[in-house]
Image (spheres, grey):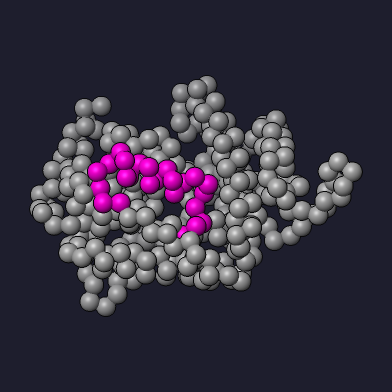
Amino acid sequence: SWTMESIVEAKVAEIRERVGDARVILALSGGVDSSVVAALCARAIGPRLTCVFINHGLLRKNEPEQVEEIFSSQFDVDFVHVHAEERYAALLAGVVDPEEKRRIIGTQFWEEFFAVAQRTGGVRFLAQGTIYPDIIESGARKTGGRAATIKSHHNLIPFPEGVSFDLIEPLDHFFKDEVRELGLQLGLPGHIVYRQPFPGPGLAIRIIGAVDAEKLAILKDADAIVREELDAYNERLFRQTGERNSAHSCWQYFAVLPDIRSVGVMGDERTYGRPVILRAVESTDAMTADWARLPYDVLAHISSRIVAEVGGVNRVAYDITSKPPATIEWE
Ligand code: XMP
């Protein structure tokens, strides 16, 4: 629409004027907010924006490739793909405690980021995808949400000694649905603009117990099936209702890999494999959530696909707990 177009133009002009001929750096996660900031800055200053994409190996299947494709071919920015998978794997080996996983992942994230910032040199500005609700939440954080500790407001970034940037937060007056509209206006694809929330620590907190390469591979494959089927389910609801977030569309959905084994049977053989837990919730703000009343045939289809297509998995369970008393994530 022309109003969105004019908002984009105003923001672009504002960024251009503020930045002048300086360089801007951004931690690009591939989520909605950081992607929209990247797209805005790309239009304003092009390759004087350095987008740092830190690949910790804990992202969903095909996600790193998609982010790289968009920001290295569709937008003219300086895109830096940091392959930190092996460093993260080593740091996380044997770590079981969820908060310890979060601490390790968060600390390493900023180390990787500042290493690139230093290497790039001459960076004056740090762009952040802070949106209006983030500011409200970091001021008066309600209980039950852990998102703010990592997807933090800027005052929580652990700047190394002597490092400082001027902040650019072009989305700090917008709500999420407005940010999505900006994203569409800027030409970002639907799979980015309508992406569901994804925790900073990624799949590490969806593998109960210690993370290893085998579990990660299983979880990525199972999760890809869950997303494919429930994306399609949401799309069917959207066609029926004309609303993106109709009462029964799923808000967040994923697979969880518990640290147990279960007995099954395949052909004449007894199997001793892994169960996968399906988690799908309806929510508007993640503070409370209800488990999605998915049709049985949708559940049945997901279950048979996972067991047939993901090696080592012989059972699928559905989490029928709301938040509270549970949380959306399992860790
Ligand atoms: P819970 O599990 O607390 O999750 O009900 C609420 C929302 O926050 C996300 N989440 C996180 N996001 N870092 C993040 O950036 C985290 O450590 C984290 N833990 C949970 C979760 O996916 C849900 O959307």
Q: Residue at x 13, y 57 (%)?
A: 22
Examine the rendering and report whether any part of residue 282 can be seen: no
Give the answer, above or below, for where 44 lies relative to 249.
Answer: below
**Quarter of the image where one finds residue 267:** top right
Residue at x 31% of width, y 67% of height: 114
In the foreground, 241 or 121:
121
On whether residue 39 falls in the magenta region, the answer is no
Q: Is residue 320 left or right of residue 47?
A: right
Quadrant including the N terminus: top left
The picture places residue 162, in percent across and down from the top left corner, at: 22, 76
Residue ranking furthest to the right: 268
Residue positioned most to the bottom? 161
Q: Is residue 67 rendered magenta in the image? A: yes
Would you say 310 lies left or right of 238 here?
Answer: right
108 to the left or right of 323: left
Asked if residue 195 is positioned above or below residue 25 in the image, the reply reads above
What span is in magenta?
56-79
Residue 196 percent coordinates (x, y): 47, 43
**The quarter of the displayed image where residue 164 is located:** bottom left
